[in-house]
Structures are given as C-alpha cells and as structure tokens.
Amino acid sequence: MEAPALAGAKKKALRERRVIVFIDESGLSQRPHRVRTWAPRGQTPVLQFHFNWKSFSLIGGITLLNFYFQLMDGAVRSPQVVTFLKHLRRHLRSRLLVIWDSAGIHRSRVVKNYIQSTRGQIVVDYLPGYAPELNPAEYLWGHLKQHQLANFCAKNGWELSFQATRALRRMRRRPSLIAACWKQAELW
C-alpha cells in the first residue's frame, strides 16, 4: 500500500474505531528450514531428517498489540479463511479493518459473502501486488522459520505441529517482537 493510501486507511480505521488486522498465510513442512549455525572447526554440521512431505498451513492476523493464528492440515482455502475471520471477531470483539494481499482465496465468493454478512463489522483493504514487505505478518512468519524452528528436524507431522504451535505461543508473549514486525514493515 502506498503511503497516502495507508495513511487514509489508518485515519478511517481510527475515525470508525476499527481494529486494523493484517492477515497472511504461510506454510510449514517437515523439511527443515536451514540457517547458519556453529560447529567445531573442521566439522560440518549435518541435519538428519526424514524425507516426509507432511505440510501444514498457517493463517495469522497481527494487530498493533497481539497476533492470532491457526495451524491447519493442508492448504488454506476459502472456508478456512472464513473460519479464521469468525475467530478473529470472537477474540477481538470490535469492528475490523482487514488488510491482506489480493490472493484468490481473499477475493473468493465465499469470503466476500461472509464479509457482506457481517454488515460492516469487517471492512477489507488490499495491499498492492508484489509488496509482501508491507505486511507485518510476513515478518512473523520469517521469525518463526529463521529463529524459532531453524534447523528443526521433525520426525512426523504431529511433532512439527506441536513445535510450531509452541513457538507461535512463545512469540505471542513477546510484545517487543510484535512491535518489531510493525516497525520492520515501516507502517507507523
């Protein structure tokens, strides 16, 4: 979103007393996310993992003070987006300004029908194409993969799901991390 458009959305959200929520999806698989690590001199570190392709999808929304997530088996589809929006409304108990990319699942008829059924409780705005750096949720996923689950080798799907959920809950208890995601996106 360009600076004037974002400023307008922010002003409108403040005027209408809406909570701004940036929503994004990401994926996790049993293949470890490799990052640089240490080892004794002359000994290359080796990650041993099983070549299973079990994958999970994450959908998350970040507000100025907190973030919310759901981990699901398989790909995120329109019904899962609607379910997540319902959970957000239940947790936030406020009118929402949802800002997300213009992915097909966000523009689907199912999602549009649900948003219309809320009678103005949810208003949607879209990020410009090819600008993931404007979405603070992208930085949450980056921190999860680069720091919390770095070099983690899950033997099976439940172990990956368990560790990812634990890591996300740990991250949620760090307000400085949430603030850093917003700052990184340079939105405020």
Image (cartoon, rainbow, N blue to C red):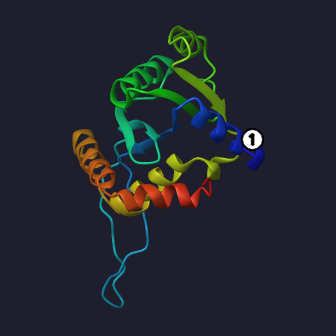
Most distant residue in the front direction: 15
Q: Nearer the viewer, residue 141 or 126?
A: 126
Q: State the residue in front, 76 or 43.
A: 76
Residue 125 image-quadrant placement? top right
Q: What's the amino acid at mark 1?
A: Ala
With 87 as the anchor, is 98 left or right in this view?
right
Tell me residue 165's x, y (percent). Answer: 27, 44
Position in image of residue 52 (x %, y %): 34, 43
Residue depicted at x 36% and y 25%: 87
Res 113 → quadrant = top right
Q: Position of residue 24 (x, y in %)?
A: 52, 38
Residue 11: image quadrant is top right
Q: Position of residue 104 (x, y in %)?
A: 63, 24
Residue 92 versus residue 64 in the image, above or below = above
Q: Is residue 20 visible?
A: yes
Quadrant of image for the N terminus: top right
Quadrant location, the C terminus: bottom right
The residue singled out by tag 1 in the image is 5
Of 58 and 98, nearer the camera is 98
Give the left or right position of residue 168, taking residue 7 as reference.
left
Q: 134 above or below 35?
A: above
> Mark 1: which secondary structure?
helix
Q: Give the residue displayed 40% in from the left and 20% down from the top.
A: 86
Q: Is residue 113 above or below residue 129?
A: above
Disc tally is: 1
Image position of 45 (left or right of 97): left
Name the residue at the bottom extreme: 41
How packed mark 1 is, by other alpha carbons closer than 10 Å (few <14, some 14-19, many 20 or more), is few
Res. 102 in view: no
